[in-house]
Image (tube, rainbow, N blue to C red):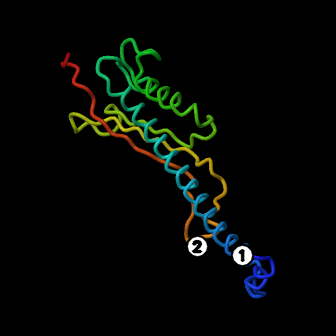
Amino acid sequence: MRPENLRKLNRKGERGAATVEFAVIATLLLLLIFGILEIGFVFWQSHYVSNAAREGLRVGVIANNYNCFDGAPSDGCTEATDRYVAVDTAVRDYLDTLYGPEDIASLEILSPESGNDEAETKPLIVTVTVNNFLDTSLIAALVPGYSNPDTITFTATGDYEDPQEP
């Protein structure tokens, strides 16, 4: 085709239409990508915190390794045989790779030794709450009613192993 014919095809009303279309599509595509990343970060943190709580629970329910809970009066209670210290250390060590000590909002560990004495067996309950490290939210600025959580919490509950089992 000759250049004169190409100029006839390019009408005045269609100049720059491809640029405008690209700008609209690129904006929507970038919002979608950043939204997926932001929700993915929150999901990843939630998964990480749940694994930390489960790791602490796993350490805490092991039978015959501990003979006291949080310095409860017992013969031979040391830091090495205190169940509370072991669970606390396991959770904090797990969270240490992603969070600093100031990011752990709360760590609650409830043992059979705590609470009422009516029930024969009470489960170990580990609740971990950390601050969300995403301070600002792109999605919250654009989507009314949406906001990232300020903290991420997970509770793991488990029964103690039977000390009689091998």
Q: Out of 95 and 44, give the one closest to the viewer.
A: 44
Element carrying mark 2: loop
Residue 50 got which mark?
Answer: none
Whichever of labels 2 and 1 marks the residue nearer the N terminus, that label is: 1
Name the secondary structure under disc 1.
helix
The residue indicated by pointer 1 is: 20
Q: Quadrant of the C terminus?
A: top left
Q: Amino acid at mark 1?
A: Val
Of 70 and 99, the residue lying toward us: 99
Up-down: is 45 above or below 64? below
Kindly report which numbered mark, 2 or 1, lies closer to the viewer in this rendering.
1
Question: Is 73 left or right of 99, judged from the image as shown?
Answer: left
In this rendered view, identify the residue nearer to me: 109 or 99: 99
- Residue highlighted by disc 2: 144
Q: Residue at x 63, y 70 (%)?
A: 25
- In terms of depth relative to the viewer, which is nearer, 16 or 121? 16
Label 2 environment density (alpha carbons within 10 Å; few <14, some 14–19, many ≥20): few
Q: Amino acid at mark 2?
A: Pro
Q: Position of residue 56 (x, y in %)?
A: 42, 31
The x and y percentages for residue 24 are 67, 73
Distance CA(mark 2)–CA(mark 1)? 26 Å
User: Left or right: where does residue 78 sit relative to residue 28?
Assistant: left
